[in-house]
Amino acid sequence: MIKSIKEKSSCEETILTGDGISPEVQKIFNLDKIAELSGKWGDPAVGSPIQYQRAVVELADGTSCEIEVYNLAIMFFHSNDERIKRLFRFMARLERHVKSRE
């Protein structure tokens, strides 16, 4: 959570590589076709504080998928869009995985 959009550059960063990425996170990424959802999602003006999440995934073919999301929980509860559900599943699994490593 951040108070203003200007704070996003100061967010803690976690880098996971190879075996550091759980099979569960990899499975969700592939099954939910998360690479198709690359881009910016949500509106930072919708909530305060702002729920901010960002994931950059480097793929085996050398390309990367960058997802930047603002207020995902609010979008999830106010939308029936399957893409939002896929983003929510992936970001939630990724966050749980990162927290379990701490």
Image (cartoon, rainbow, N blue to C red):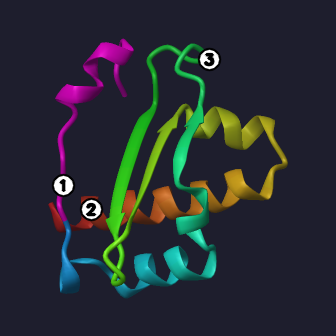
Q: Is 80 on the left-hand or right-hand side of 10?
A: right
Q: CA distance from mark 1 to mark 3?
A: 26 Å
Residue indicated by mark 1 = 14
Main SS type for the magenta part? loop
Badge 2 element: helix
**Residue at 74% in and 39% down:** 77
Residue indicated by mark 2 = 98
**Residue at 57% in and 13% down:** 45
Query: Who comes first in sequence, dot 1 or dot 3?
Result: 1
Q: Would you place residue 28 above or below residue 47 in this image?
A: below
Query: Who comes first in sequence, dot 2 or dot 1?
Result: 1
Residue type beneath disc 2: Val
Query: Who comes first in sequence, dot 2 or dot 3?
Result: 3
Disc 2 residue crowd, few under 14, some 14–19, many 20+, Cα 10 Å: some
Q: CA distance from mark 2 to mark 3?
A: 26 Å
Q: CA distance from mark 2 to mark 1?
A: 8 Å
Highlighted magenta segment, given as a residue range: 1-15
